[in-house]
């Protein structure tokens, strides 16, 4: 019998391949041009998982080694579903399908492709590379002075921190809370979940890596924001990358260009990108999903609450942030702790999965879709920057408004923001999703449920905390996180626009910001991704001049850091 075993194996293999089918085809638009963006998803009847084929430059897709049967066929263009039909395969087929692309479809494709170019390998290298250079230049200040930095943060929280009489509008602690108000937003709930859904469980690892080096970047931003700030005719302090680029870099044509480019990009991001409309939409969507509240009602409430604070300027924003930010972080972390403790014994396996996925070709677990290492790195770093803002330069704007004994002091305070956001809050989101097993229902694992964004985090919470309470925690956290981000980014945007057009534009800018907050909350559907992708690109445009300016000013940061932190040991 053993003599026939090899022949039997060959026979069974031939039987399988002879019975296997191919499904190939081409997707064209209404004008006959190939559709090059998006993917075709195929799922056998009775299966839980999709297999995918990305469209190539000719709009073609390929599926091989299929068994005869009934299949669900979808064309997805960056979450916008354009075709959905049932196919009965008895023999191999070659299809030519026409899909009608609207203006919004084309805008979605354009903004996604622009975002992919903006956050390509070159930006990842520049962003992480700048963090590494600043880490070396400052003697890894994020490690050597982390304890001292948090000691000053806690002293500020207890009103025992630095409260000197130097020029400034708010305390250093209020400046940190304003910066955290901007960074601890829906990027921590929806952004981390989206990174896992599209980049697999390995994406958060690259968030952590970028975050560790990003702490040195944030330190430099806080330091330079105070060192090169200016007093405006209104009496308020103004600073940020546009100021330290213009007044810190000695090559004046480059200095002026980088300052103007940052200010323009920051103004766009604050109005149209992730700092405004995307946040209000996430808030309205969470309340619609959990409580059935119509988006226009949420829009009206959000707009009124934002308007009441931002009209009061940085002092009002800082005052609200001091109270709101610690409370909202505690609320979210307590909910996440319940999920983590319920799965406490799985924590070692969770970290092993994250590490394995970060360096594997496909998502761990045999998923038919999978993600590449490059995708995991790109998505992890991109969403990490969206969350902690290290490299964007935004925190420098907040720190520039604070009373300060020394620029290095503000650098220390600023860098704790990245630690709190990425190493602390983001890790809670990551662990709840991994430990609960909710990640198995994402597109990265080929699940037909395709959970992503806030829905994925809700699924993780409700795996332990009964419905509707788990979802209610996420809805409330999403509201508070989004609200805090809105009020802080209005300040960032107005200061950037003030740099371009002067103090007279501040109030009109606030009014436009408030109007767009309302608009963002009532927009629904997959085309909202146009705003997220536009925000991604604007973030990259913010980061580019800021990172270049930081590289120009590395020696300025290094000299004062070595002198005041390591020689004189002021902190």
Image (cartoon, rainbow, N blue to C red):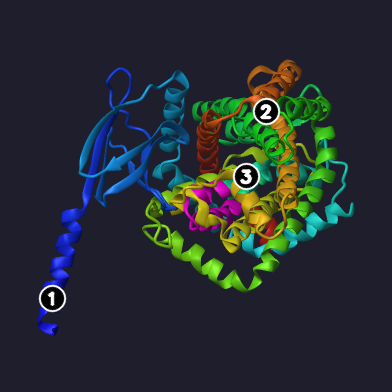
Secondary structure beneath label 3: helix
Most common secondary structure along the magenta stretch: helix
Left or right? Give the position of 277 relative to 383.
right
Cβ atoms at labels 2 and 1 below 8 Å apart? no
Q: Nearer the viewer, mark 1 or mark 3?
A: 1
Please provide the residue range marked out in magenta: 193-216
Give percent across and percent down for residue 464: 69, 60
Q: Earlier along the polypeptide chain: callout 2 or callout 1? A: 1
Viewer-side label of 2, 1: 1
Residue drawn at (72%, 52%), measured in percent from left and top?
A: 467
Residue 547 visible in the current orientation: yes
Residue of label 1: 6
Residue drawn at the location 71% of the way across and 41% of the way down: 290
Read off the residue under disc 3. 454
Give the mark nearer the N terminus: 1 vs 3: 1
Q: Closer to the camera, 100 or 2?
A: 2
372 and 450: which is toward the camera: 450
* In contact (CB < 8 Å): disc 2 and disc 3: no
For label 2, count other residues whose C-alpha is less than 10 Å away and answer few (under 14), some (14-19) or many (20+): many
User: Mark 3 and mark 1 in contact (Cβ < 8 Å)?
Assistant: no
Residue ID for mark 2: 521
Quadrant in the rendering for residue 490: top right
From this viewpoint, which residue is outermost toward the bottom?
2
Q: CA distance from mark 2 to mark 3?
A: 15 Å
For the residue carrying disc 3, how many other residues have a C-alpha within 10 Å: few (<14), some (14-19), or many (20+)?
A: many
In the rendered image, which quarter contains the N terminus? bottom left
The Cα atoms of the two marked residues, 1 and 3, are separated by 52 Å
Q: Position of residue 234 (x, y in %)?
A: 81, 22
For label 2, the SS is: helix
């Amino acid at each position: 019998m053993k003599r026939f075993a090899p022949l039997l194996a060959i026979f069974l293999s031939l039987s399988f391949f002879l019975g296997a089918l191919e499904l190939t085809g081409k997707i064209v638009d209404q004008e006959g041009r190939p559709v090059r963006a998006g993917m075709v998803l195929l799922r056998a009847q009775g299966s839980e998982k999709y297999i995918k084929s990305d469209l190539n430059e000719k709009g073609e897709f390929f599926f091989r080694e299929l068994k005869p049967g009934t299949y669900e066929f979808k064309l997805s263009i960056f979450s916008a579903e354009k075709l959905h039909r049932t196919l009965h395969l008895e023999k191999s087929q070659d299809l030519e399908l026409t899909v009608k692309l609207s203006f919004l479809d084309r805008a979605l494709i354009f903004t996604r492709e622009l975002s992919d170019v903006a956050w390509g390998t070159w930006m990842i290298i520049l962003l992480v590379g700048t963090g590494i250079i600043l880490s070396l230049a400052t003697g890894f200040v994020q490690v050597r002075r982390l304890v001292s930095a948090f000691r000053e943060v806690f002293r500020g929280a207890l009103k025992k921190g630095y409260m000197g009489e130097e020029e400034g509008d708010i305390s250093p602690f209020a400046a940190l809370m304003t910066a955290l108000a901007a960074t601890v937003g829906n990027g921590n709930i929806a952004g981390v979940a989206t990174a896992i859904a599209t980049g697999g469980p390995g994406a958060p690892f690259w968030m952590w890596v970028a975050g560790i080096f990003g702490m040195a970047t944030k330190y430099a931003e806080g330091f330079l924001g105070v060192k090169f700030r200016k007093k405006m005719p209104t009496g308020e302090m103004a600073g940020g990358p546009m100021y330290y680029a213009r007044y810190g870099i000695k090559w004046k044509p480059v200095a002026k260009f980088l300052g103007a480019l940052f200010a323009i990009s920051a103004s766009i991001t604050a109005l149209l990108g992730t700092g405004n409309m995307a946040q209000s939409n996430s808030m309205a969507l969470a309340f619609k999903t959990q409580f059935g509240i119509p988006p226009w009602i949420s829009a009206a409430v959000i707009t009124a609450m934002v308007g009441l604070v931002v009209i009061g300027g940085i002092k009002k924003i800082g005052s609200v942030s001091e109270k709101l930010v610690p409370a909202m972080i505690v609320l979210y972390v307590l909910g996440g702790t319940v999920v983590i403790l319920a799965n406490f014994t799985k924590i070692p396996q969770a970290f092993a999965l994250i590490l394995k996925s970060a360096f594997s070709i496909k998502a761990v677990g045999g998923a038919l879709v999978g993600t590449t290492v490059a995708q995991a790195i790109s998505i992890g770093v991109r969403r990490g920057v969206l969350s902690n803002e290290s490299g964007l330069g935004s925190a420098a704007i907040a720190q520039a408004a604070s009373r300060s004994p020394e620029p290095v002091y503000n650098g220390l305070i600023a860098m704790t923001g990245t630690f709190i956001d990425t190493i602390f809050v983001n890790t809670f989101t990551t662990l709840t999703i991994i430990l609960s097993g909710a990640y198995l229902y994402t597109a990265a694992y080929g699940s037909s449920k395709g959970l992503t964004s806030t829905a994925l985090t809700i699924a993780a919470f409700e795996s332990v905390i009964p419905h509707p309470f788990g979802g209610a925690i996420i809805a409330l956290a999403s509201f508070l996180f989004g609200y805090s981000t809105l009020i802080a980014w209005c300040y960032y945007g107005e200061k950037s626009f003030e740099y371009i057009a002067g103090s007279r534009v501040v109030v009109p800018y606030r009014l436009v910001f408030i109007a767009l907050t309302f608009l963002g909350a009532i927009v629904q559907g997959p085309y909202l991704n146009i705003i997220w992708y536009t925000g991604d690109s604007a973030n990259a445009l913010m980061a580019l001049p800021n990172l270049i300016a930081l590289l120009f000013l590395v020696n300025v940061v290094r000299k004062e850091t070595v002198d005041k932190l390591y020689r004189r040991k002021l902190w």
